[in-house]
């Protein structure tokens, strides 16, 4: 397994950061200490998983101890997207502002623990069947993008719109 380590600091990004291979973890020194700050309206901020629509799963790609914030007006994209990954953990992550908070798409056997999703700017957006300003989006409306065996523990949503799609397939919150 490989690791992208973000020591204490603020990391200004102007395009999507993508991790699309097995076993790569993004690890920081704390959700209030290692901050990725989005500086434009370009799509998702941090994307973990498969970049195509296949049902191939990336395994063991974890995220922990980071914060992701958006600045300015953002009209699309999520702060953190997990897509087609399995057997992974997202832990102690803070998501603030922007258009979308966390989007879980086509994942299985995932644990989300210690998440804080706060605020949002745009009240008119949509992601599949989900709409809102800043959200936890778990679409389960089609087999290719369905999420299975998802455990979410210690979730705090402040000033957000939260949607879970249809609650099924071992989804626990």
Image (cartoon, rainbow, N blue to C red):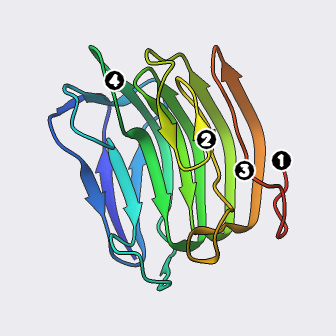
Q: Which residue is mark 3?
A: 165
The part of the image, by quadrant, that contains residue 28 is top left
Instruction: Give the CA separation, mark 1 to mark 2.
Output: 17 Å
Which of disc 4 and disc 1 is earlier in sequence?
Answer: 4
Which of disc 1 and disc 3 is earlier in sequence?
Answer: 3
Q: Residue at x 29, y 16 (%)?
A: 73
Q: What number of labels is visible?
A: 4
Q: Are marks 3 and 2 in contact (CB under 8 Å)?
A: yes
Q: Which residue is mark 4?
A: 70
Q: Are marks 4 and 2 in contact (CB under 8 Å)?
A: no
Tell me: residue 166, above or below residue 120: below
How far across and how far down the image is residue 29, in percent?
Answer: 43, 37
| Tag nearer the camera, 1 or 2 | 2
Q: Residue at x 24, y 47 (%)?
A: 16
Instruction: Give the CA separation, mark 4 to mark 3.
Output: 25 Å
| Tag nearer the camera, 3 or 1 | 3
| Disc 2 crowd, CA 10 A, few/some/many (<14, 14-19, 20+) | some
């Amino acid at each position: 397994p490989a690791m992208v380590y973000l020591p204490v600091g603020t990391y200004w990004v102007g395009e999507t950061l993508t991790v699309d291979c097995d076993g790569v973890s993004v690890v920081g020194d704390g959700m209030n200490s290692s901050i990725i700050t989005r500086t434009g309206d370009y799509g998702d901020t941090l994307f973990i998983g498969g970049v195509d629509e296949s049902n191939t799963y990336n395994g063991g790609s974890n995220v922990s101890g980071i914060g992701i914030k958006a600045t300015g007006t953002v009209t699309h994209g999520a702060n953190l997207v997990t897509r087609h990954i399995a057997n992974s953990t997202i832990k102690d992550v803070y998501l603030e502002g922007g258009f979308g908070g966390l989007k879980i798409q086509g994942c299985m056997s995932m644990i989300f623990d210690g998440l804080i999703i706060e605020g949002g700017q745009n009240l008119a957006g949509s992601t599949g069947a989900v709409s809102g300003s800043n959200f936890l989006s778990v679409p389960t409306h089609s087999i290719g993008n369905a999420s299975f065996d998802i455990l979410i523990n210690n979730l705090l949503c402040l000033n957000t719109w939260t949607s879970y799609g249809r609650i099924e397939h071992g989804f626990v919150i």
